[in-house]
Image: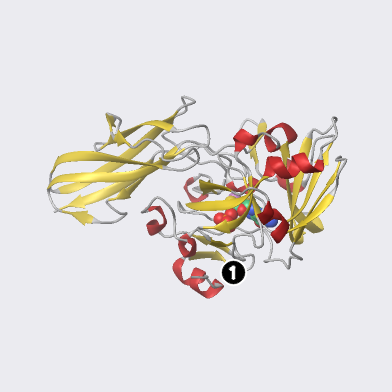
Amino acid sequence: MATSLADVRGALTMISRVPFNAEAPPAALAGEVTPTPLHYVRSNFPFPAHDGTVTIGGAVSNPMTLTLDELRLLPALERTVTLECAGNGRLAQTPLPAGEPWGRYAVSTARWRGAPLHQVLRRAAPSPDGLEVTFEGADHGRYARHEDISFVRSLPLSLASDPASDILIAYEMNSEPLNREHGAPFRLIVPGWYGMASVKWLKRIDVISGRYEGEFQTNHYVYHHADHSSEPVTLMHVRARITDPAPGSAISAGTYRVRGKAWSGAGPVTSVGVSITGGGEWQAAELEPPSGPHHWQDWSFEWRSATVGRHTLRARATDAAGHTQPEAPPWNRLGYGNNAVELQYVDVY
Ligand SMILES: Nc1nc2c(c(=O)[nH]1)N[C@H]1C(S)=C(S)[C@@H](COP(=O)(O)O)O[C@H]1N2
Ligand SMILES: [Mo]
């Protein structure tokens, strides 16, 4: 079933109409994969026109322009990937930073199919002094102090040409041709990274021999910390979410199996702790092994003898890199990367 913009707008919570930004409903996190109409949408500019080709150039010895059909001729790779906007959770930061007022649902998971980026790059034959690769979307417009810029991001050439990074030029999402809001006819998918790296409506790929310093690389999508240090936004921070009981729900007294999701851009989640008291006391949840390298994991916790009254549930994940979640939202000027432990209170009857 193809999804029209009207369907999408009905299922999602609108953040802004033009450019179209919309948050997923809690149901987006219910299953292994988020149904396409429930997948959050983030765009910096109005949806663009696209001529159906992508050009690979810059410091390469074999520049080329490829159509969708030509991309489809390359061996296809399919990967299930959790995508989270770096601004997810911004509303919980204090003082509130500028930027789209995302609540907690700018996160979703989809099955992407496309051409492996490393194969496309290999055919173009990057020159030995190549350092980074820039990816340009067809979307553009007025932004910050710029009259008219397009959405461009870069990645290190070493990462872009590494088969193990699983970076795709994706043309299918959940077994259907990519739709307009998610980047038709094709987009980049960079597993493990916050969503800004996954450039939609991909139009140009250029190998460059220096560092890319465009607006969306060195001004936006940068952590400007309170101490004035800064660093680029890259991998998704480790995070757990309670999905059941749902926010604001009431349950009956007794035993209840609490369920949730957990994810991290830095390798699998290795443990999830649940607290039902506030103030600490983390008890180990049962964590499902990842069913793929790049998507969220299920966890559950047997909550015994829930007594009548209000209870405070929290979940905290730790990943393979040893990172865990902070208790308080980390503040930075543009409000990125908030992975603080979330509180969900539940009324028991
Ligand atoms: N061309 C283009 N690609 C883009 C963006 C954009 O504004 N323009 N936004 C990025 C951001 S910030 C995110 S979080 C993801 C969101 O992808 P989705 O809309 O498919 O969920 O797209 C990324 N790719
Ligand atoms: Mo984003």
Which residue type carries mark 1? Arg
Dot 1: within a 10 Å radius of its alpha carbon, few (fewer than 14), some, or many (20 or more) residues? Answer: few
Q: Which residue is mark 1?
A: 17
Judge whether 104 appears above or below 163 on screen. below
Figure quarter occupied by ligand 1 = bottom right
Quadrant location of the C terminus in the rendered image: bottom left
241 displayed left or right of 218: left
Q: Residue at x 78, y 45 (%)?
A: 214
For ligand 1, tell me if the residue under mark 1 lies within 8 Å: no
Judge whether 11 appears above or below 166 on screen. below
Q: Is residue 178 visible?
A: yes
Q: Position of residue 277 (x, y in %)?
A: 24, 36
Q: Quadrant of residue 143?
A: bottom right
Q: Position of residue 42 (x, y in %)?
A: 59, 57
Q: Secondary structure at mark 1?
A: loop
Of the pair 90 and 295, the residue shown nearer to us = 295
Q: Position of residue 108 (x, y in %)?
A: 48, 52
Q: Residue at x 41, y 37 (%)?
A: 290
Q: Position of residue 227 (x, y in %)?
A: 62, 30
Q: Is residue 98 visible?
A: no
Of the pair 28 and 89, the residue shown nearer to us = 28
19 displayed left or right of 207: left
